[in-house]
Amino acid sequence: MPSFDAGEAPRRSTSLLDAKFDVGANGMDMITRYFLRRLAISLPRKQWASASGPYHEALVEVILVFIALPAVAVLSFVGLSTMRWCDPIVHARWPWLGFGTVGLIIWLLSVLVGHYRLGKRLRQYRDDPSKCAELSSGEDRRIAFRQKFTVIVVCGVIAPWLGIAVNEFSK
């Protein structure tokens, strides 16, 4: 538990990327633990041309799991659930603005924002990956796989199906 001076209120985070989810006994938040697990999985491979290769692979996975895929899930749910009434209005006004164009824009923005915000926060592990040693067990590998699998299923399957269901039942 953080210590505060008398009269000082705890600082509240205003950004989801700054939020501390489920801070464990080691003082790391959920995003940092997932990153270190992915870094521990990437480090043993010898195919890297530079020492920062495993760092970049882990960073890309973190951006995908925590930012890009949830953003695409929200887009797919909103886009599919409002397709009946929104699609004709949007296409009449902006014919170039299709679901794929909006998806690509959201995807690129989420990757750029993720790289800027998470890259800055996780850069400390690029040159000193020794912290990932405590998260490199077989159980940690299984946890990382289950987290990634859950995000892919929820964002790639359940969110679009819910959007289609809302669209179908709103007739």
Image (cartoon, rainbow, N blue to C red):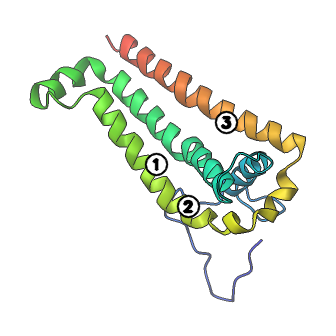
The C terminus: image quadrant: top left
Labels 1 & 3 near each other (Cβ < 8 A):
no
Q: Counting residues from the N terminus, which is met first, the one under dot 2 or under dot 1?
A: 1
Residue 148 disc label: 3
Name the mark nearer the viewer: 3 or 2: 2
Residue 130 higher or lower than 110, as above or below = below
Whether residue 19 sits left or right of residue 116 in the image: it is right
Name the mark nearer the viewer: 1 or 3: 1
* Residue 93: % across, % down: 10, 30
Please rate how many residues cluster around mark 3, counting C-alpha atoms within 10 Å: few if below 14, some from 14 to 19, many from 20. Answer: some
Amino acid type, mark 2: Gly
* Residue where numbered disc 2 is placed: 119
Please rate how many residues cluster around mark 2, counting C-alpha atoms within 10 Å: few if below 14, some from 14 to 19, many from 20. Answer: some
* Residue where numbered disc 1 is placed: 111
- Residue at image position (42%, 28%) is 77
Please rate how many residues cluster around mark 1, counting C-alpha atoms within 10 Å: few if below 14, some from 14 to 19, many from 20. Answer: some
Whether residue 114 sits left or right of residue 38 in the image: it is left
Q: Secondary structure at mark 3?
A: helix
Labels 2 & 1 near each other (Cβ < 8 A):
no
